[in-house]
């Protein structure tokens, strides 16, 4: 087993044997050899050093396979979820099927960061893929809603472990010049699943049954495992130190804080589902656990947009939260205010997925590397523009295709921003911190989603949107027929999220760390 020279675990045995000077010399020699090897890869060109060249092809295809699997699950399962909840008589617990995945993934993201830093990314990656598949089997075989929610929680554990581990694999397996292209492949891997996932899942649900949407996906896990394993074995290995045991990892400060975040988020979500004075107690306890823990989990200075890494992590939460919150209300807007069918309303978002991949490809061009911070700011500005354009369809004379056009702009901006953020994070992270920092980025993403979706929901109800939902509940009328019009409710949501995106554009001015 070859030790990773960048891992802090290697320093402990050297110090214990009194060979510190020799270890330092070996360390410098290894760094020089690695630099020479990378130079040789550069000379070989695309055939040897490109992401689809001889040296990296298997690893790249394996990564794309894993991301595609997660993307297909997200789009397919969301399509089958309403049918599953009705079949299990669990409509009242419908929201918890989503929150279970979210809260479990929050804990798993922190665990994956510590685990990857101390023992390398292979164990958490394959554990995550296995847990992801196991969760799908539990959910697909569920006999009641409680068992179904438990399966979703296991899926969340697997997804959180796998996603963070993949970032660490990118940091260890590719030279810096290739990382933008790998991040572009992350986005490209979402394109086909987002387009075909709902159609395939809908067909399976109607023709065979909702259970097979869950039970069929685990079979696909074998492909990325077979493709990736030989390439992953060639990665530099980390020799576990005295604190590298799994029990010590689970008991680490970061994992304890992540557990507090997960429990706190669960309590807050539970309180949000129960209106009444008795909901104040779980809400208060949840916030008391959530707020202090998340402040300590994210890099110091994140919430004041500290220069460099803290600003990158903050921008990720702002970008993801603004997009998901705005996107959640677009189908409802088109169905209730403009009379579109649910299918057409959903198709209006498809172009955003395609241009997201295009934006991610553009940011990977070598000539744009020195403009990475500006690309991220431009991406946030384009997202803010797209969100501002959407509520124009509240005016009757404005054609509904404006929404589809606007979302292609927003998708392109997200492609520039999200992929560049991943590249910049790895560039600003020391090798021994890549796992923890990657988990911080993913946690900021998840927290941005839940925070701004919640804020949007409060604004929507406060400005009269609750009557829209009440009028539509149980209605068998055609879409838009007799719908209650509350343009102020939608306008409040989109204006607020446009402000969030514009704030992210301002944060882009602080992405470059201070000299030295």
Image (cartoon, helix red, strand yellow):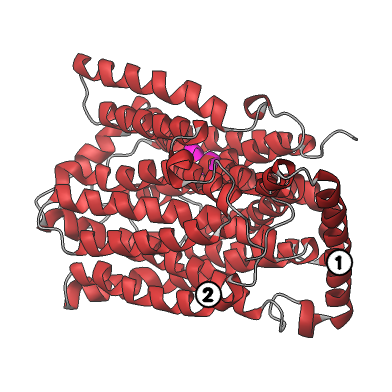
Q: Is residue 17 left or right of residue 193?
A: right
> Is residue 446 something that shows in the picture?
no
Nearer to us of marks 1 and 2 is 1
Residue 165 location (% of width, % of height) = 54, 56
The residue indicated by pointer 2 is 229
Nearest the viewer among 422 and 57 is 57
Identify which residue is drawn at 65% across, 47% down.
Answer: 9
Sort mark 2 into few (<14), some (14-19) or many (20+) by Cα contacts within 10 Å.
some
Sort mark 1 into few (<14), some (14-19) or many (20+) by Cα contacts within 10 Å.
few
Identify which residue is drawn at 87% across, 76% down.
Answer: 40
Q: Is residue 228 left or right of residue 6?
A: left
Identify which residue is drawn at 24% across, 65% down.
Answer: 137
> Is residue 100 something that shows in the picture?
yes
Dot 2: what SS?
A: helix
Q: Is residue 287 above or below residue 333?
A: above
The residue indicated by pointer 1 is 33
Nearest the viewer among 113 and 382 is 113
Where is residue 459, by image quadrant?
top left
Residue segment shown in magenta: 444-448
Residue 32 location (% of width, % of height) = 89, 62
Q: Main secondary structure of the magenta part?
A: helix
Asked if the residue at tag 2 contacts the one at tag 1, i.e. Cβ–Cβ closer than 8 Å, the answer is: no
Nearest the viewer among 163 and 187 is 163
Residue 126 location (% of width, % of height) = 45, 63
Where is residue 471, by image quadrant?
top left
Q: Is residue 353 magenta?
A: no
Locate the C terminus and report the quarter of the image it occupies: top right
Locate the N terminus and report the quarter of the image it occupies: bottom right
Q: Is residue 105 left or right of residue 174?
A: left
Give the spatial CA distance, label 1 vs label 2.
25 Å
Dot 1: what SS?
A: helix
Q: Is residue 445 magenta?
A: yes
């Amino acid at each position: 087993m070859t030790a990773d020279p960048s891992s802090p675990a290697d320093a402990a045995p050297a110090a214990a044997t009194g060979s510190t000077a020799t270890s330092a010399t070996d360390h410098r020699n290894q760094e020089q050899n690695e630099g020479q090897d990378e130079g040789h890869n550069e000379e070989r060109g695309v055939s040897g050093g490109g992401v689809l060249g001889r040296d990296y092809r298997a690893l790249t295809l394996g990564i794309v396979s894993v991301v595609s699997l997660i993307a297909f699950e997200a789009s397919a399962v969301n399509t089958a979820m309403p049918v599953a909840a009705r079949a299990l008589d669990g409509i009242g617990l419908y929201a918890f099927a989503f929150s279970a995945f979210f809260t479990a993934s929050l804990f798993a993201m922190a665990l994956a960061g510590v685990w990857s830093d101390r023992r390398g990314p292979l164990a958490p990656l394959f554990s995550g893929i296995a847990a992801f598949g196991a969760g799908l089997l539990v959910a697909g075989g569920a006999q009641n809603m409680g068992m179904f929610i438990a399966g979703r929680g296991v899926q969340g554990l697997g997804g959180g472990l796998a996603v963070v581990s993949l970032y660490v694999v990118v940091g260890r397996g590719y030279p810096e010049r290739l990382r933008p292209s790998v991040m572009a492949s992350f986005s490209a891997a979402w394109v086909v699943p987002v387009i075909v996932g709902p159609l395939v899942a809908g067909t399976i649900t109607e023709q065979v049954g909702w259970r097979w949407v869950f039970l069929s996906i685990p079979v696909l896990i074998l492909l990325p495992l077979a493709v990736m394993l030989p390439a992953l074995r060639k990665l530099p290995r980390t020799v576990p130190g005295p604190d590298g045991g799994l029990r010590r990892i689970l008991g680490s400060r970061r994992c304890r804080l992540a557990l507090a975040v997960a429990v706190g988020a669960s309590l807050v979500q539970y309180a949000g589902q129960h209106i009444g004075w008795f909901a104040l107690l779980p809400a208060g306890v949840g916030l008391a656990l959530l707020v202090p823990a998340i402040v300590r989990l994210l890099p110091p200075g994140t919430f004041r947009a500290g220069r460099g890494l803290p600003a990158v992590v903050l921008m990720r939460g702002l970008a993801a939260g603004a997009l998901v919150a705005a996107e959640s209300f677009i189908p409802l807007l088109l169905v209730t205010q403009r009379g579109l069918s649910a299918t057409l309303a959903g198709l209006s978002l498809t172009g955003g997925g395609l241009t997201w991949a295009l934006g991610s490809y553009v940011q990977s061009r070598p000539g744009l590397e020195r403009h990475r911070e500006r690309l991220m700011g431009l991406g946030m500005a384009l997202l803010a523009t797209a969100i501002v354009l959407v509520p124009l369809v509240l005016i009757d004379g404005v054609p509904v295709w404006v929404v589809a056009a606007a979302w292609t702009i927003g998708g392109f901006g997200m492609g520039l921003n999200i992929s560049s953020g991943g590249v910049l994070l790895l560039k600003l992270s020391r090798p021994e911190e890549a796992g923890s920092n990657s988990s911080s980025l993913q946690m900021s993403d998840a927290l941005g989603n839940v925070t701004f979706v919640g804020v949007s929901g409060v604004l929507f109800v406060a400005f009269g949107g609750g009557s829209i939902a009440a009028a539509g509940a149980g209605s068998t009328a055609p879409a838009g027929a007799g719908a209650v019009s509350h343009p102020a409710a939608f306008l409040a949501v989109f204006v607020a999220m446009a402000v969030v995106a514009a704030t992210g554009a301002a944060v882009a001015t602080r992405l470059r760390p201070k000299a030295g």
